Image: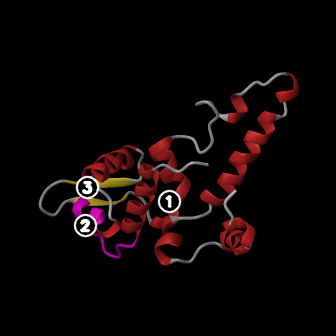
Amino acid sequence: MRISAKTDYAVRAAVELAAVTDEHPLKSERIATAQEIPLRFLENILVQLRQGGIVVSRRGAEGGYRLALPPEEITVADVIRAIDGPLAAVSGERPEKLDFHGTAEPLREVWVAVRASLRDVLEHVTLADLASGALPDAVRARTADPDAWLTR
């Protein structure tokens, strides 16, 4: 899976919002500075997150951004989908919609399994988990395996 800079920035911005303990919205400048995200790029990302129902915005001197839901209810998968669409697409299509023939026929099941593996992690890690540093045990177990850290 390739995670674009845009998606990485979106998740980081959402985690920054999740770490806010009061109800005051954060200015995009504060998020950009805290996460070292180029401001113009972040502003476009925040628009997409708003359109995707992840954040809400308020205009004015007291304006800014905050999460649309409690951070416990927003997963990393939700943020990714708001920016990039489905978690796993093959040539822009959802894996279950693909139709392979001949010896490639089992490939559809492989792509569906890849999507299921991504969901297994990304749909179970919330913004609250990231903001607190308390990742789910299943994620910690995966990263405890030294093989997980090897580049191939």
Of 80 and 90, nearer the camera is 90
The quarter of the picture where residue 9 lies is bottom left
Residue count near mark 3 (Cα–Cα under 10 Å), binned few <14, some 14–19, many ≥20: some
Which badge, 3 or 2, comes first in the chain's sequence?
A: 2
The quarter of the picture where residue 23 lies is bottom left
Residue at figure coordinates x 62%, y 37% from the top left:
89
> What amino acid type is highlighted by mark number 3?
Leu
Residue bearing the label numbered 3:
39
> Residue 142 location in percent, x, y?
71, 68
> Residue 42 location in percent, x, y?
31, 53
Which badge, 2 or 1, comes first in the chain's sequence?
A: 2
Residue 98 sits above or below residue 83 on the image: above
* Residue 17 lies within the magenta run: no
**Mark 1 secondary-structure assignment:** loop
Of 147 and 1, nearer the camera is 147
Of 6 and 109, nearer the camera is 6
> Residue 25 location in percent, x, y?
26, 65
Residue bearing the label numbered 1:
74
What number is the disc on residue 30? 2
**Mark 2 secondary-structure assignment:** helix
Magenta region: 19-32
> What amino acid type is highlighted by mark number 2?
Arg
